[in-house]
Image (tube, rainbow, N blue to C red):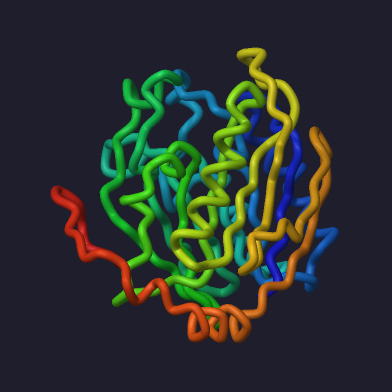
Amino acid sequence: MKIALLQYPIEWANPQANVGLLDERLRAIAGQADIAVVPEMFNTGFCTDRPGLAEEWGTGPVFQSLQHMADAYNFGIIGSMMVTDNGQLYNRGFFFRPQDAPLYYDKHHLYKSGGEAEFFTPGNMRTIWEFRGVKIRPAVCYDLRFPVWLRQDKHNLYDIFICVACWPTVRIQYWDALLQARAAENHCYAVGVNMVGTDGLQMDYNGHSVAYDTWLHDIAGFEDYECATRIVDFSIEKLRHFREVLPQWEEADEYKLENTGVDR
């Protein structure tokens, strides 16, 4: 499976500009990937105190544009955006698929220090998406810090862990360590896509987007602050062989999470 990682700046609180910029970037790689991954809140930046920027899920212009791009360029698009749904505000991880209805995952762990918990509703669904024969586990930014929430279930394996983020430079060492840890403990490929630049709150972001193979080698290779697209090719057959040779995932402890929904 070929996955494009798009690391770039986000125009603060400007959905129209960000959708236009994304369309240009995706058009440039049309036909070259199965999935394109963009940063958290790709259309606004991390504007947690501006709920008026959210649009209604299923009917808004950003929703319509993402579906059009997925159809036109024939690949899935994964990222997150602010949405309203049934009167609630969510930081919604999305997966727009060509010629098919989009899937979604609502961020479970809201970043209180960034004001998210004051306005947003946490999701409670531990979701696995299947696309072109590959199982994907999504996460949004702060979710990355919580290994139990993301733990591989030996009865319901996923192949690729994908985390989208607005993770600032001042704490980037945790991003680096946690992404690698999630890949190692879950015996899977891992992709993390972060923004670069300075946002409207003067927070600095240096990126560190990454793609880990089975040996925890970074096969994406972004430089600090680099605005670029990298396409990586993950062999699912190689991953499954790796799991057969080193079947630690079979020895995972059984556990049960309380007060959450079921996988969908």
**Which x, y percent locates residue 176?**
61, 41
Residue 76 vertical placement versus 191 (above, below): below
Q: Is 50 placed above or below 184 here?
A: above
Identify the residue at image location x=66%, y=13%.
202
Outermost residue on the top side: it is 202
Please count the marks in the image: 0
Please state the horizontal and vertical placement of residue 218, each as a whole percent of the image.
72, 56
Can you give x and y, in whole percent of width and height, for residue 10 in the image?
70, 32
Please state which of residues 59 and 252 is positioned toward the viewer in this rendering: 252
Image position of 92 (left or right of 252): right
Answer left or right for 75 relative to 149.
Answer: right
Identify the residue at image location x=51%, y=59%. 184
- Quarter of the image where the N terminus is located: bottom right
Nearer-the-camera pick, 9 or 181: 181
Residue in the picture at 31% in, 67% down = 252
Q: Quadrant of residue 61?
A: top right
- Point out the image quarter for the C terminus: bottom left
Q: In the picture shown, does residue 234 fall above or below 56?
A: below
Say which residue appears at 69% left-offset and 46% top-offset.
209
Q: Is residue 7 left or right of residue 258?
A: right
**Residue 69 visible, this orientation:** no
Give percent across and percent down for residue 248. Answer: 41, 73
The image quarter containing residue 49 is top left
Q: Is residue 255 visible?
A: yes
